Amino acid sequence: MPGVIRAADVARILEPYPPSEWTGHDWIPGYRVAQDGRRQVNVFHDGPGETDGLEKYRLELQAASYCVIPDQQPGGGRRRLHITRP
């Protein structure tokens, strides 16, 4: 069973990359983390370059010993990474 994980801990690993920001009419590209229960955090890339951004985040988080599973929201929605602790 995966261990407890916090979105703030995942965000700390991704600090070298810019966080996304909504300007009111468009996204400034970057990462966004969202807590999904006690044992999972989701990572998104907002703005252009989603595929490349998620790949960079995947490599960075795996190097930090997190379990990373690429996923897509149901119904062909946004791509994201499921992050857990082994």
Image (spheres, grey):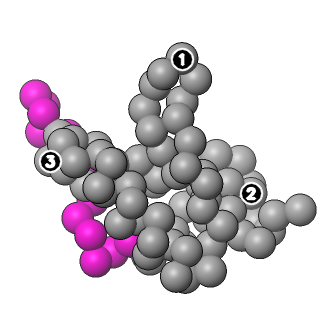
Q: Which residue is mark 3?
A: 28
Q: Quadrant of the C terminus?
A: bottom right
In the image, the segment drawn in magenta is 14-26
Q: Which residue is mark 1?
A: 75
Residue 26 position by quadrant: top left
Q: How many marks?
A: 3
Q: Which residue is mark 2?
A: 39
Secondary structure of residue under mark 2: loop
Secondary structure of residue under mark 3: strand
As drawn, 80 above or below 63: above
- Quick one: label 3, few (<14), some, or many (20+) residues within 10 Å? some
Report the amino acid beneath label 3. Answer: Ile
Q: Nearer the viewer, mark 1 or mark 2?
A: 1
Q: Is residue 15 left or right of residue 38?
A: left
Between discs 2 and 3, the one toward the N terminus: 3
Q: Are the residues tagged 1 and 2 within 8 Å (C-beta)? A: no
Image point (52%, 82%), residue name: 63
Report the amino acid beneath label 2. Answer: Arg
Where residue 48 sits in the image (x, y, percent)? 18, 42
Secondary structure of residue under mark 1: loop
Where residue 13 sits in the image (x, y, percent)? 44, 77
As drawn, 32 above or below 67: above
Query: Which is more toward the observer, 8 or 50?
Result: 50
Where residue 27 sits in the image (x, y, percent)? 17, 40
Image point (23%, 64%), residue name: 18
Where residue 2 sits in the image (x, y, percent)? 81, 64
In this view of the protein, can residue 34 be seen by the observer? no
Q: Is residue 34 left or right of residue 84?
A: left
